[in-house]
Image: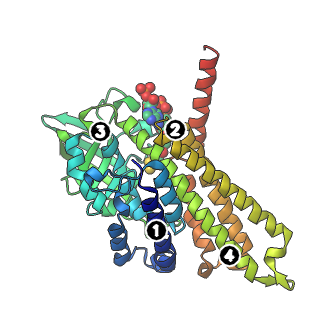
Amino acid sequence: MALEPEVRDQFLETVRRFVSERLIPAEPIVNETDSIPDDIAQEMKDMGLFGLTISPDFGGLGVNMEEEVMLAMELGRAAPAFRSLFGTNLGIGSQGIAIDGTDDQKQKYLPRLASGDLVGSFALTEPDAGSDAGSVRTTAVKDGDHYVINGTKRYITNAPHAGLFTVMARTDLSEKGARGVSAFAVEAGTPGLSLGKPEKKMGQQGAHVCDVIFEDSRVPADALIGGVEGVGFKTAMKVLDKGRLHIAASCVGLASRMLDDMMDYAVTRKQFGKPIAEFQLLQAMFADSKADIYAAKCMVLDAAKRRDLGENIATEASCAKMFASEMVGRVADRNVQVHGGNGYIQEYRAEQLYRDSRLYRIYEGTTQIQQTIIAKALIKEARDRNGL
Ligand code: COS
């Protein structure tokens, strides 16, 4: 479903203003206190950001993929910690239920996820199952009309705030790979569910991750997402296809912001008697950044439009995520370099955005995993073409 063009443009404008007038000025305090101020979190709820992608049937705005990435490009201009607060609700923390959940599961959880009253988290990664997501060891063993869950989930974004976890656990213990995995909607407060210590991270202060530990946690059988065992890995992959496009769009946003920052600095900072923007060696960095951003933006928008048309865009989502996250790393590095010594000093924020952007190349699938996905699809196409 698409918004009316005027409504969409108005919303984009509101978000743009919110980012420049509220979020970017609040970055130093978020960085210092490692938390998002309550008034900003409330404004995000009031604007409907938690429910952007959730259907209006369940109280969300129901934006399509193209609109989602356009909004993510605006929101991505601010430090990524802000996006993290509502990002799991509109993405990986709700989409398992939105895409594959039963009607009852949707009715039960989506309205509160859309309003932001309930925070959703996605619990796939484990100490020994990172890139190899199909090898999860957490188990969910059927016991009458319950499942008993045991295992540890690692670095779960928003876990300290979450009221609901989408948990990938192995229901078929005889099957070691992806086919033995099922997805569950598990509520915080379930006996036997506890949280690990908050992790100290390289960047993205204000966004919180920790372990989620299950010790004989009994969940009702109807917590099984979609009511079907053995398809949890596929649910996770579908969620990640969408998530990866969203991340790629956020990278475009942050890179655009950093290009603006470096240009503003370069036209005002003087050395050798003139603004440093006039030096050709720096101009190469501006031009490379602009072309990098433009290429990533085109990829993101194209893949999003295709997804809205019903195409399978798993490969394109990986291309966009890989290119955009590497691109934002290059731009972050150039931003520090253009700022010279000031780029290394906190006050100028180039160093913070450099650290913050580093995670984009890792979460929701590393660059190397995206390369593997793209190559696998190409090999399959070639084999099919050659009748092999
Ligand atoms: N959409 C739907 N189904 C998908 C899919 C997708 N995008 N990708 C894979 N599947 C299906 C496959 O079709 C296959 O189904 P069948 O068993 O019916 O053939 C099944 O899922 C298993 O796929 P595959 O064999 O490709 O799985 P692998 O174990 O080889 O893993 C990778 C594939 C590496 C791509 C996967 O483990 C992955 O994405 N890892 C990174 C995880 C990640 O992003 N972690 C970040 C933390 S989460 S924030």
Q: Alpha carbon of mark 2 to alpha carbon of mark 3: how far? A: 31 Å
Q: Tell me which amino acid carries mark 3.
A: Thr
Of tags 3 and 1, which is closer to the observer? Answer: 1
Question: What residue is shown at x 62% (from left), y 79% (from top)?
Answer: 348
Q: Which residue is identified by label 2?
A: 313
Q: Are marks 4 and 2 in contact (CB under 8 Å)?
A: no
367 w.r.t. 51: above or below: above
Cβ at disc 2 under 8 Å from ligand 1: no
Q: Tell me which amino acid carries mark 1.
A: Val
The label on residue 139 is 3
**Dot 4: element:** helix
Q: Are marks 4 and 3 in contact (CB under 8 Å)?
A: no
Q: Tell me which amino acid carries mark 4.
A: Gly
**Dot 2: element:** loop
Q: Which residue is identified by label 1?
A: 15
Of tags 4 and 2, which is closer to the observer? Answer: 2
Q: Alpha carbon of mark 1 to alpha carbon of mark 2: how far? A: 27 Å
Q: Quadrant of residue 147?
A: top left
Residue 22 visible here: yes
106 w.r.t. 209: above or below: above
Q: Earlier in the sequence, mark 4 or mark 2?
A: 2
Q: Earlier in the sequence, mark 4 or mark 3?
A: 3
Q: Tell me which amino acid carries mark 2.
A: Ile
Q: Quadrant of residue 44?
A: bottom left
Q: Alpha carbon of mark 4 to alpha carbon of mark 2: how far? A: 38 Å
Q: Which residue is identified by label 4?
A: 343
Question: What residue is shown at x 71% (from left), y 61% (from top)?
Answer: 289
Q: Earlier in the sequence, mark 1 or mark 4?
A: 1
Question: What residue is shown at x 57% (from left), y 71% (from top)?
Answer: 352
320 w.r.t. 119: above or below: above
Residue found at the very far top of the displayed protein: 387
